[in-house]
Image (cartoon, rainbow, N blue to C red):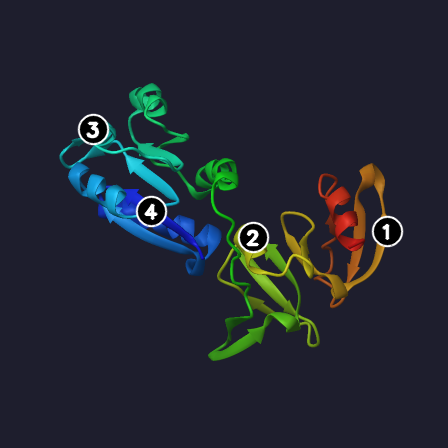
């Protein structure tokens, strides 16, 4: 069972953009979206259905969305989205849990969702089983069990195959990918590496509690694989499960 999300937004591009950002964060299988463009349409939707989370633009086609609260009670987390700073106080007075100033990006959305998530029903995302990857003109279905680690380099994210050491471009980000893989098997050691437990060949403690890893297959020459200082304690707990 996933989250039912109502987006009260009269601009199609804004609705689609927010929907895509949330889908990237949590995966399409655990989210259900509804859209209301007008005050009365939102009132009807809130009265008829249960939602776990509501995103609400302030300027709608027929007025300010604060009018909605004169007709219906909202008892779920509510995030206001607007291009106007002057409504922040009124938003919080009308049950707003957060206030996102447009245009906002996925990082800003993720920060807000991290605060809101404990208030939402617990959902278990479907874990990724395989990736469709390209090499030359060929396509390949690469199973997650055959991947040693993921490595970000520049603007690209690569999956490194266990047996062959071949690398394939993955159309994703490490931040999102962490939510799609088994946390008992993979660990994000720093901003660039998401590592499978059995790809670790050896570990060496270095300065400031950091840990240097030797992986197989080895990454390209000159790239050190270091567990960052802030992730080192949780990494060691992960190893000891």
Q: In the rendered image, is residue 4 in sight? A: yes
Nearer the N terminus, badge 2 or badge 4? 4
Circle 3 packing at 10 Å, graded few (<14), some (14-19), many (20+), is some
Q: Secondary structure at mark 3?
A: helix
Q: Are marks 1 and 2 in contact (CB under 8 Å)?
A: no
Circle 4 packing at 10 Å, graded few (<14), some (14-19), many (20+), is few
Work out how far the residue at label 3 is from the one at label 2, CA to CA, in angstroms.
Answer: 47 Å
Work out how far the residue at label 4 is from the one at label 1, CA to CA, in angstroms.
Answer: 52 Å
Identified at 26% across, 31% down, the residue is 58
Identified at 34% across, 36% down, the residue is 103
The C terminus lies in which quarter of the figure?
bottom right
Q: Nearer the viewer, residue 208 or 28?
A: 28
Q: Label 4: which residue?
A: 50
Q: Nearer the viewer, residue 43 or 111?
A: 43
Work out how far the residue at label 3 is from the one at label 4, CA to CA, in angstroms.
Answer: 20 Å
**Vertical side of 14 occupied by 171: above or below:** below
Q: Label 1: which residue?
A: 204
- Percent from the top left, x then y, of residue 239? 78, 54
Q: Label 3: which residue?
A: 67
Residue farthest toward the bottom in the current orientation of the protein:
138
Nearer the N terminus, badge 3 or badge 4? 4
Q: Are marks 3 and 1 in contact (CB under 8 Å)?
A: no
Nearer the N terminus, badge 3 or badge 2? 3
Q: Is residue 125 left or right of residue 164?
A: left
**Vertical side of 35 occupied by 89: above or below:** above
Q: Label 2: which residue?
A: 154
Work out how far the residue at label 2 is from the one at label 4, CA to CA, in angstroms.
Answer: 43 Å
């Amino acid at each position: 069972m996933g989250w039912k999300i109502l987006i009260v937004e009269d601009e199609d591009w804004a609705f689609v953009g927010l929907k895509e950002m949330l889908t990237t964060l949590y995966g399409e299988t655990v989210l259900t979206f509804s859209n209301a463009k007008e005050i009365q349409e939102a009132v009807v939707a809130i009265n008829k259905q249960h939602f776990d989370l509501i995103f609400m633009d302030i300027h709608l086609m027929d007025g300010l969305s604060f009018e909605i609260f004169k007709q219906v009670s909202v008892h779920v987390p509510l995030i206001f989205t607007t291009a106007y700073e002057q409504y922040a106080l009124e938003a919080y007075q009308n049950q707003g849990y957060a206030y996102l100033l447009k245009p906002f990006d996925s990082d800003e959305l993720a920060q807000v969702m991290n605060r809101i998530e404990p208030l939402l029903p617990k959902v278990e995302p479907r874990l990724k089983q395989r990736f469709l990857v390209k090499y030359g003109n060929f396509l390949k279905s690469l199973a997650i069990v055959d991947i040693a680690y993921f490595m970000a380099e520049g603007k690209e994210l690569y999956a490194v195959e266990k047996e062959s050491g071949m690398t394939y471009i993955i159309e994703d980000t490490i931040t999102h990918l962490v939510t799609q893989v088994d946390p008992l098997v993979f660990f994000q050691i720093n901003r660039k590496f998401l590592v499978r437990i059995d790809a670790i060949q050896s570990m060496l403690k270095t300065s400031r509690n950091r840990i240097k890893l030797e992986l197989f297959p080895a990454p390209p020459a000159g790239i050190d694989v270091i567990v960052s200082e802030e992730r080192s304690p949780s990494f060691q707990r992960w190893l000891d499960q």
